[in-house]
Amino acid sequence: MVDIHTQHISHDTIDVPDHRTTRGRASLKDATDTVSVVVSTVGHAPNLVPSDYPNLMTLFHTSAERLNQACFCRTLNLSRLREQLENDPSLSGLMETIAQTRPNLFSSTVVFISAEVQHRIHCTVAAIERIATLPGYQSQALARAPALAQQAFGPLGACMGYDFHLGEAGPQLIEINTNAGGLLLNLALARAQEVCCDEMSWAFPSHAPGNELADVVFAMFQSEWRHQRKDQDWHSVVIVDDDPAQQYLAPEFELFRQLFAQRGVSASIADPRALSWQGGQLWHQGAPVEMVYNRLTDFYLAEPAHETLRLAYETGAIVMTPHPHAHALYAEKRNLIALGTDEFLMQWGAEQPDRFALQAGIPETELVTLARSDELWARRRHLFFKPVAGYGAKAAYRGDKLTRRVWDAILAGDFVAQALVPPSARMIELDGVLTDLKFDIRAYTYAGKIQMLAARMYAGQTTNFRTQGGGFAPVIVVPSKESA
């Protein structure tokens, strides 16, 4: 169990810095007594029942929303960030590399959410994780998957990610990722924050977070090993991705390598083409491979370049995480149709609180078919279209931006249509100009427990790391008085 770092305050109003006028003093008495900086939270979310639902007319008129529009504090301390990123001699120069090649990886500010939003995110994640264990749900999910994904070797799947937009009806699950990037980068970012002004001193603990989350992340991989190898000793891991040095989140590969090495597990980073199969064993640089931390987006290892890795996985010669079985159960987009259909959930034996949580937390999702093309085209302005096997917003389209050419390509492919949930806004000050950016919330999880919440700030149709002032941002939770 890793505790939330919490600072309690006891006053009726909180100064909200507002640089559009003089210092604006906004009364937050009705919504805020304490503030928690979410560095990591691990534990089961309570069941959600209808009486838990906040009043939808007032949920997003809380202090959190006001702070997102009125607080322009820059809380990122670059010197601290360098210390966090380069905490080992082998990582020297990592900060400079990021600054030169990935200048929009980190935002200099934070995002605020209410305790009610945090609670609803917990409930949605926990409900899905429980429903995913039901035989009926697994049967429909695996029926669409290739033979490779039918095999379950034991590991649950490390580094899960649940992405949410904060809609008028509360947090809405946009997609599930089984190889969500950014966990260790966001840990370093959270440790590098500082108070910008007196008015915001309540929002940050007086001490920097310790190594609790790093230990939790390592324990996650230990757990994956034990799920398959039981009491056998674990000595090594290879972090695998295509052309890893060219991946945008390549700096995180180095952070994971060092995380493992600091705890006595030999770690290396490799392109799958650098792996070889000899004598029923996977090898890398003359050493046998015990575990693969899989960062590939070829989720079913179907590409020719991944054939060696596929053979090692399907024969059980390695422990791989995340893996094809987890992707089939969680991340394939058609699962959102099933999870959002209450009739199916009832048939599979889902508990009522979990059904309520998913009714409230998953926007309507439907399959795109030629038979319904005219109907979907007529409703396109209220829909978002995604490929069923997509990731990272690739080939994803807002319906109101569609051309007929793109629409024809969607009809020729495998797509789902999801009810459009516009992302929330975060006002920042950029070179003296007020700029409104969008953000989503990512919950990093393992075994149904949330490890960390982080935001991604951006401009444009979908999340990206090309927006000046955008990038990853820490999440600060503003609890209601009732939860204090």
Image (spheres, helix red, strand yellow):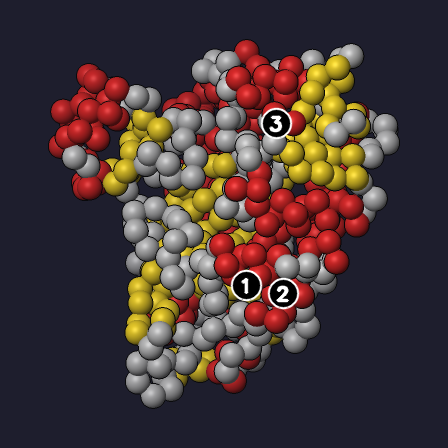
Q: Point out the frontmost of discs 3 and 1.
A: 3
Give me the residue at 21% from left, 31% from top: 406
Residue tagged by mark 3?
272
Q: CA distance from mark 2 to mark 1?
A: 35 Å
Residue 212 visible somewhere in the drawing: no
- Residue 411 pos. (x, y %): 24, 22
Please, what secondary structure does the residue beneath circle 3 have? helix
Please, what secondary structure does the residue beneath circle 1 have? helix
Q: CA distance from mark 3 to mark 1?
A: 48 Å
For residue 399, what is the image quadrant?
top left
Q: CA distance from mark 2 to mark 3?
A: 30 Å
- Residue 373 pos. (x, y %): 18, 23
**Disc 3 and disc 1 in contact, CB within 8 angstroms:** no
Give me the residue at 64% from left, 59% from top: 93
Amino acid type for the residue under numbered disc 2: Arg
Which of disc 3 and disc 2 is earlier in sequence?
A: 2
Please, what secondary structure does the residue beneath circle 2 have? helix
Which of disc 1 and disc 2 is earlier in sequence?
A: 2
Which of the numbered marks, if any, corresponds to residue 82? 2
Amino acid type for the residue under numbered disc 1: Ser
For residue 181, what is the image quadrant?
top right
- Residue 72 pos. (x, y %): 41, 74
Residue tagged by mark 1?
483
Give me the residue at 32% from left, 26% from top: 415
- Residue 379 pos. (x, y %): 17, 34
In depth, the one of 37 and 469 nearer the eye is 469
Q: Please say if 147 is above or below 459.
A: above
Which of disc 1 and disc 3 is earlier in sequence?
A: 3
